[in-house]
Image: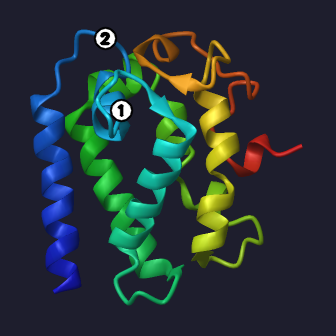
Amino acid sequence: MRTLFTLAAATALTATAALAQMDAPGSHFVENWDYDRDGQVTLEEATQKRGEIFFMFDQDENGVLDSAEYDLFDETRALDRENNAAEHEQMGLRNADEGMNRANNDPDGDGMVTEAEFNASTESWFTGMDSDGDGVLTAADFGPGKRGKGQGQGMGKANKG
């Protein structure tokens, strides 16, 4: 049942992406992460979304993404990148995606990503994408040459002092 839910969620992400307008850089990201539909993603929304993503891929519900679960997560993100290649590559979403990589969410390098590890990298990942430093992510934070206040890292582990 959990696998069916994960596949349905992955399909929904892909379908939403297909409907997203590509007028502005980051529009796909904002559409998927902006819960209150005010055109901006707050740290609270990003934290909530990352928690839901973790839950979606933690198929055995043990609070850890093991290798197989993270492989499924990687495959789903790869499908999203494929379906939205123009926005991901040309419009500055590389940092958003890299911040979800296993290496950036596994600070102890044991190959297992705990929920605490995954959530701990949220703030630095978010800050790394907030190019204007206003504390919210909008389409204006994305695009060619945009770098967040986190020295352009856009990812948790690499962005920690």
**Camera-side residue of 45 and 122:** 45
Q: Which residue is mark 1?
A: 29
Instruction: Specify the amino acid type for callout 1.
Output: Phe
Above or below, 78 against 115 in this view is above
Q: Is residue 115 left or right of residue 108?
A: left
Residue furthest to the right in view is 161
Instruction: Specify the amino acid type for callout 2.
Output: Ala
Q: Residue at x 13, y 65 (%)?
A: 8
Q: Position of residue 145 (x, y in %)?
A: 57, 10
Mark 2: secondary structure:
loop
Figure quadrant of residue 128? top right
Q: Position of residue 80 (x, y in %)?
A: 26, 44
Mark 1: secondary structure:
helix
Label at residue 24: 2
Label at residue 128: none
Q: Pointer 1: residues within 10 angstroms few (<14), some, or many (20+)?
A: many
Quarter of the image with the N terminus is bottom left
Task: Find out whether the residues at labels 2 and 1 contact each other: C-beta distance under 8 Å.
Answer: no
Q: Position of residue 109 (x, y in %)?
A: 73, 71
Q: Find the distance from the CA under tag 2 to the CA under tag 1.
A: 11 Å
Q: Residue at x 17, y 27 (%)?
A: 20
Q: Pointer 2: residues within 10 angstroms few (<14), some, or many (20+)?
A: some
Above or below, 92 against 6 in this view is above
